[in-house]
Image: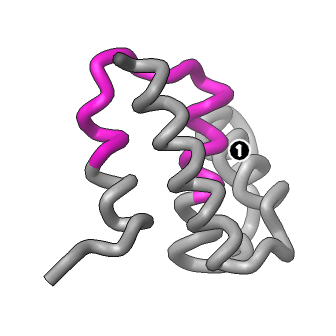
């Protein structure tokens, strides 16, 4: 049994020797969530939950993108990160 490129990318991102910057991490998070769950659901975290709010906003920015497109972008981003990690 072979993993899908999306599943493989989820494993590959864990093996990077350098942690990406916060902006890239948010993009990875948003594309992963859009690719696995679809459009954002629920209410935006408020108050002092700055991390939760940033994650929600990043995911909401992907709204309307198909799960297949989000998965393809996620895979491409991880491959780019892996290439720069060499």
- The x, y position of residue 80, in whole percent, is 54, 34
Furthest-left residue in this view: 1
Identify the magenta region: 12-31
- The x, y position of residue 70, in whole percent, is 66, 66
Q: Is residue 29 magenta?
A: yes
24 relative to 10 in the view: left or right: right
Q: Which residue is mark 1?
A: 53
- The x, y position of residue 2, in whole percent, is 21, 77
85 relative to 53 in the view: left or right: left
Vertical placement of residue 5 versus 56, above or below: below
Q: Residue at x 84, y 55 (%)?
A: 61
Identify which residue, 80 or 24, lies in the foreground: 80
Vertical placement of residue 72 versus 84, above or below: below
> Residue 9 is drawn in which quadrant?
bottom left
> Residue 35 is drawn in which quadrant?
bottom right
- The x, y position of residue 29, in whole percent, is 56, 49
Q: Residue at x 28, y 19 (%)?
A: 17
Vertical placement of residue 29 versus 62, above or below: above
Which SS class for mark 1?
Answer: helix
Vertical placement of residue 14 versus 56, above or below: above
């Amino acid at each position: 049994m072979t993993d899908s490129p999306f599943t493989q990318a989820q494993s590959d991102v864990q093996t990077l020797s350098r942690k990406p910057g916060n902006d890239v991490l948010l993009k990875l998070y948003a594309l992963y969530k859009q690719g696995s769950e679809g459009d954002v659901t629920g209410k935006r975290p408020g108050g002092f939950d700055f991390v939760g709010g940033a994650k929600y906003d990043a995911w909401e920015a992907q709204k309307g993108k198909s799960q297949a497109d989000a998965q393809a972008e996620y895979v491409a981003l991880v491959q780019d990160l892996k290439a720069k990690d060499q």
